[in-house]
Amino acid sequence: MSLTNKTPLEIPALNGDNDNLGIVFFNIGIFLIILGLCMFIPVAVDINSHNPDWRVFALCGGLVTAIGGLLYLANKRNYKSLSVKQGFLITTTTWITIPLVGSLPFIFSDLDISFTDAFFEAISGVTTTGSTVLSGLDGMPPGILIWRSLLQWLGGVGIIVMGIAIMPLLKIGGMQLFRTEAFDVSENFIPRSTKLAASLSVLYVGLTTMCATALTLAGMTPFEAICHALTTISTGGFSTSDASIGHFDSAAIDYVISIFMVVGSIPFVLYLKLMHSGPKYVFCDQQVRGFLLVLASIIGPLSIYLYLNSDYNLANSFRYVVFNVISVITGTGYASTDYTLWGNLSAVIFFFIMFIGGCSGSTSCGIKIFRFQIMIITIKNYLKKYFYPNGIFVSKYNNHKVTDTVSSSVFVFIFLFFMSFIFISLCLILLGLDFKTAISGAGTALSNVGPGIGNVIGPAGNFETLPDTAKWVLSFAMLLGRLEILSVLVLMSTRFWKN
Amino acid sequence: MLPDIKFSFKELKYSIFYMVLSVFSLSLIAFITFELEYFTGIELESFLEFLGVLKNNWIETHGALFLHSIQILFLITFFAEVKIIISRMTRNWTL
């Protein structure tokens, strides 16, 4: 066929489903339009409080919406389906583009921070990490405060959808155990994914509204309550005060936030089951039971330890331990007090529990409870086989058979997680950070927790003083942790880019 | 080898659209519910003042209590609304 006979549609690079980049830009365009429109919420907040920063948000909002609109229109084609390759590309590029664009208001506002700091703050928000480079939050413009909270809240929605719809299909880190038929379009396509997405959104907004109302009842101002509700349900951890939740010094607020942090760490599909068929499903779930058991087994002994080794009475010991343990395990990252001052034992415990994480299909992060449970099941099975070599043992998790593929996926994930942890720690040490800051910084970024351990990045400090290169390394670690490592690593493989 | 799965693009597009729509709709429902309850509360208080059950300008001295009562009422009604909406959305599902 001669070149002159070719119609534009026959050019492979621009042809429908084969156009990898077109579909990626199209999706990024949609997300940028949504992000741009969200920037008008801080505009309203700043106008209401007579803050001149509203112009920055209005300009950025207009610009981002326009760029998003152009990307959308320029790449609009009759796409039919997305391949896994395109799925990986869209996931990672979106999680890089949104913080890039989300950092614009930080750069152009009166905060006077560098691009590195602005990007760090934005990626920490979108990945729901909650590490901050900003200080003087108590006197900060309300528009900036609500924007930080909104970034975490939007990140939370993305994580739920990823955890329920995308990761189980991509079979990352044993997530295939949570495969939901609603998003399965490979063979027996059930056209209800839109309904599932819509009902999850209703649930997410519903829980956020309930959390905000409960926080207002507990004594916060409506603005503080909204900001904290947005970052509690998303297990993000950005606060409106430098002292985080410790600023309020209220047991009621501590307990309300603790409850909603746990709520945000339980699989959201279970809430749909709860509203659909009653509460039995929630407590029958092996992952939820494991999560609650882990919480109880850490909170109980640590409360007694704190009571015996501090001036707190039993009620206050329990309150501080409940709040801070839940905050760190779920990856929220709020602090009601500097728990690293409770003694060496508590510092060690808080360092290790930051890796645990909540349940799969929730907004929380870290290794996640189900992976520990699968590891225990696999090890038990291995021991049984050791004693009974000819025996056949079938392991089950939540009534699903735990295949060798699932077990190996989990072990691979955990291996990669700790290899990444070592690599990031070494990078930070090479950049001049002290040992405690380096390893806790790597851990907190990979697990998307927020504060680390030590004087610099501990609950009483922040990430402002770290060198710029360290902030970029930590930003990469946050992205790696949030996208379950393999989604990012797969893009670095040459095989991925071959046809 | 990457898993052989195709995501439906149409479903993805509609999902994003419905998610945004749900967020706005529920926020609107929450706002309307709270405002309705607040104004009903105000009217009820005026009526009780008119009947003589409450002292004149009761709301000025008991503003915080009134607001807290409305907030508790809102929490309960809003939870019920969310439950009804989700029950309807997930009707005939095998979750």
Image: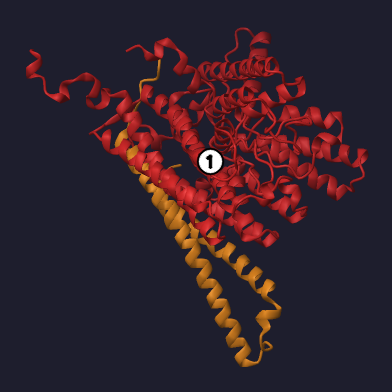
Q: Is residue B93 visible?
A: no
Residue type (three-letter) at the residue carrying disc 1: Gly
Location of residue A90 with respect to A405 vertically, above or below: below
Q: State the residue in front, A370 or A253.
A: A253
Determine the residue positioned at 66% across, 16% down.
A422
Q: Disc 1 is attached to a residue of which chain?
A: A
Q: Residue A245 at what x, y percent from top left? A: 72, 48
Circle 1 Cα neighbour tier, 10 Å, few/some/many (<14 / 14–19 / ≥20):
many
What colouring style does the render use? Answer: by chain
Q: Residue A499 at what x, y percent from top left? A: 32, 13
Determine the residue positioned at 36% across, 20% down.
B4
The orange one among the chains is B
Q: Residue A435 at what x, y percent from top left? A: 76, 19
Q: Quadrant of the N terminus of chain B?
A: top left
Q: Which residue is mark 1?
A: A156
Where is residue A35, by image quadrant?
Answer: top left
Q: In the image, is A394 to the left or to the right of A79? A: right
Location of residue A185 with respect to A235 vertically, above or below: above
Colour of chain A, in one word, is: red
Q: Is residue B25 visible?
A: yes
Q: In the image, is A155 to the left or to the right of A22? A: right
Q: Give the structural element (helix, strand or loop) at label 1.
A: helix
Location of residue B82 with respect to A75 vertically, above or below: below
Q: In the image, is A15 to the left or to the right of A235? A: left
